[in-house]
């Protein structure tokens, strides 16, 4: 959209500057140029705002991805800790069973 507006200004300027252009064409160009430049400025501002928003969105996305990776790593650590605790409990039960299954010194 911005490139189109800039191209239109350049095209109209060439036509108005042409040796074939009469006074009416030059005057019409003069009346048209102000609003055309204002529209071009509006489009440039819109483009810059869109680019800035895109940059912000990319930064937010990068932060979200980093947070996701951190959350996944935390979940993996917590799962590993749960598994280790379960293994320790099971080993404790096995040890306890082993102690109760052995004959004591008095039973021999």
Image: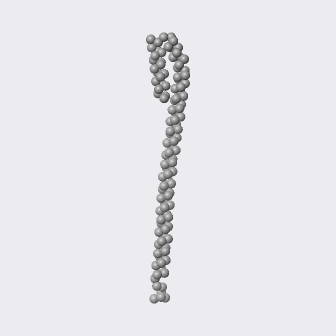
The residue shown at (49%, 28%) is 2
- The spot of residue 19 in percent (x, y) is 44, 11
- The spot of residue 43 in percent (x, y) is 52, 29
- The spot of residue 18 in percent (x, y) is 45, 14
Coloring basis for residues: one colour
Question: On screen, 40 above or below 81?
Answer: above
The residue shown at (53%, 19%) is 32
The residue shown at (48%, 11%) is 22
Q: In the depicted view, which residue is nearer to us: 28 or 51? A: 28
Question: On screen, 34 above or below 66?
Answer: above
Give the mark count. 0
Q: In the depicted view, which residue is nearer to us: 70 or 25? A: 25
- The spot of residue 17 in percent (x, y) is 46, 15
The residue shown at (45%, 20%) is 11
Question: On screen, 62 above or below 24?
Answer: below
**Location of the C terminus (image quadrant):** bottom left
């Amino acid at each position: 959209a911005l490139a189109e507006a800039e191209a239109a200004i350049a095209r109209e300027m060439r036509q108005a500057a042409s040796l074939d252009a009469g006074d009416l064409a030059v005057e019409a160009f003069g009346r048209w140029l102000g609003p055309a430049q204002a529209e071009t400025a509006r489009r440039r501002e819109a483009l810059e705002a869109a680019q800035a928003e895109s940059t912000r969105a990319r930064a937010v996305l990068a932060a979200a991805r980093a947070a996701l990776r951190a959350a996944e790593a935390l979940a993996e650590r917590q799962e590993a800790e749960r598994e280790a605790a379960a293994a320790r409990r099971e080993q404790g039960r096995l040890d306890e069973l082993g102690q109760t299954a052995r004959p004591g010194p008095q039973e021999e």
